Image (cartoon, helix red, strand yellow):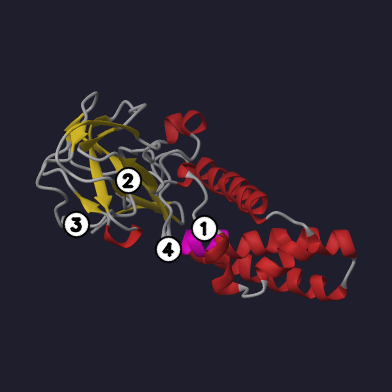
Amino acid sequence: MLLTDGSPNDDESLQVYESAILQASDTERIPLRAKLHLALEEISEDVLNVLLAHGVPSDPQATTRRLKGVSDVVVTRQMKRWHAVHTLEVFYRDAFNNQLNTRYQAKFDEYHDLSENARDRTYQYGIGLALIPIPRAQTPVFSFVAGLIVETIYYVKVSWVSASGQVGDPSELTTYDSPASSLPVVTAVNPPPVATGFNVYMGLSPETVTLQNTTPVAVGGSFTLPGSGLVAGSPPGCGQTPDVYVTGGLMLRRG
């Protein structure tokens, strides 16, 4: 996924690092979603500052970096961890300032150190960039046509595809209740300029969502589930991987 696609982590992800974070959030009435968003903003500013400081030829988009911002930055495993622990730092910073509780200060100090370490590791590994960034798809639009399938609830995702076959991060999982004697029709909306088509992933449960189209559906077109029903295609991915890495003032090409 791209750094501008949304939060790299959710509440469940934070529990991997801090098992009691949901209870703390309820107790102190500090919304985790807001802190996830704030941490993402702070990380994005930090990453942009580094990219601006590198300049030509470190950053392949250096001449337009101020305009592009971080829209081409790919969330690597290192950056995902950085965002998680920085979110916890932001959360406990707020909790301590609200309560002046030394227990929260200790938590804040712990995650402050972890966040700095994760930031350093991210920069050592490199800031990953996509040369042709494809943003996350929005929730698709559903309709139906006459068919022979019984009433069914489908779980659905879509993702944009570029002319070169690169696939963006899938949309959030959504459901569609298809009426009896009908076939669901899925349409992706608001295509980015780089998209030439989209993929459709469907299943009868969140765990069984797989690719249904054999070739990308053209932008402006729709996918209709055939009367034969779902097929067992490949599962949705996590979006693009970096084409280049900016690290230590150098651009390192993948592979």
Q: Residue at x 63, y 61 (%)?
A: 86
Using the numbered discs, state the Cα–Cα distance from disc 4 to disc 2 in whole angstroms: 23 Å
For mark 4, give the secondary structure: helix
Q: How dense is the environment of label 4, judged by Cα within 10 Å: few (below 14), some, or many (20 and up)?
A: few
Frontmost residue, 134 versus 245? 134
Residue that mark 3 sits on: 234
**For marks 1 and 3 on the same chain, the one whose residue lies earlier in the sequence:** 1
Decide whether residue 82 is among the magenta residues: yes
Measured as percent of width and height from the top left, residue 8 is found at 49, 54
- Earlier-in-chain disc, 1 versus 4: 1
Q: Which residue is mark 4?
A: 77
Which residue is under mark 2? Answer: 157
Q: Are marks 4 and 2 in contact (CB under 8 Å)?
A: no
Q: Residue at x 20, y 50 (%)?
A: 211
Tag 3: residue type?
Answer: Ser
Callout 2 amino acid: Lys
| Sequence-earlier tag: 3 or 4 | 4
Residue that mark 1 sits on: 9
Q: Is residue 76 left or right of residue 110?
A: left
Q: Secondary structure at mark 3?
A: loop
> Which image quadrant is residue 146 in?
top left
Q: Are marks 2 and 3 in contact (CB under 8 Å)?
A: no
Pick whichever of labels 2 and 1 is earlier in the sequence: 1
Asked if residue 154 can be seen in this view, the reply is yes
Query: Mark 1 is on which residue type?
Result: Asn
- Depth order, front residue of 235/240: 235
Which badge, 4 or 2, comes first in the chain's sequence?
A: 4
Q: Residues within 10 Å of mark 3 (few under 14, many from 20)?
A: few
| Magenta stretch, residue numbers | 78-83
| 1 or 3: mark nearer the eye | 3
- Assign a secondary structure to mark 2: strand
Q: Main secondary structure of the magenta part?
A: helix
